Amino acid sequence: MATAEKSVMVVGIDHSEHSLYAFEWTLDHFFAPFPGTAPFKLVIVHAKPSPATAIGLGGPGAIDVLPYVEADLKKTADRVVEKAREICSSKSVTDVTVEVVEGDARNVMCEAVEKHHASILVVGSHGYGAIKRYSLSSFLLLLLLFFNLFISDGGRQLVLQAVLGSVSDYCAHHAHCTVMIVKKPKTKH
């Protein structure tokens, strides 16, 4: 009798606390309780922005900073992957595939679903509503346009999310599988 192949679960991760929370929550509920017999094959995907996208609006000298931006993006990706492997190891989850794919996170996640024929995609949620995303991005866009500031990767991500919509929202509408959005509970004061 042939054994059935496990369904694939793709988990999108980045360096944010919301992403890591979603990742750990997923491991705790779908993998750690079933050592060696988890119901899913786990594929962890980190979307690494391209250096040109990370710089955003290029000005004089933008080409000169590309190698530094690329090195920084690679270091960030390496840290994210290392952290994911550490978390898996601490929870005795060993059958894991980890991928770093360059591109926009929304597209990378949906393409990973197709590539691996995933039945579930898990992404975290920062918890920004459309209005909060819009307000925050408007402020950051003003900084970029009027002061030509080089802002952090996190700042650029906020601008992109506000203008283009969140990764979780995009995946919920475009991924060809079930999408589970894991939101970190807010702490009560």
Image: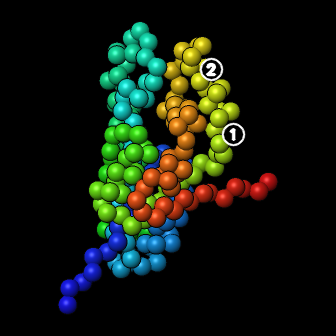
Q: Position of residue 139 (x, y in %)?
A: 65, 26
Type of amino acid at the residue the image marks with label 1:
Ile
**Residue drawn at (59%, 13%) of the image:** 147
Mark 2 surroundings: few (<14), some (14-19) or many (≥20) residues within 10 A:
few
Q: Residue furthest top?
A: 60
Type of amino acid at the residue the image marks with label 2:
Leu
> Do callouts 1 and 2 mark residues in contact (Cβ within 8 Å)?
no
Q: Which residue is mark 1?
A: 131
**Residue drawn at (36%, 33%) of the image:** 50
Which is more toward the observer, 52 or 111?
A: 111
Mark 1 surroundings: few (<14), some (14-19) or many (≥20) residues within 10 A:
few
Q: Which residue is mark 2?
A: 142
Taking the image as shown, residue 71 lies to the left or right of residue 27, namely left
Q: Position of residue 163 (x, y in %)?
A: 56, 34
Q: Residue furthest right?
A: 189
**Residue drawn at (52%, 31%) of the image:** 156
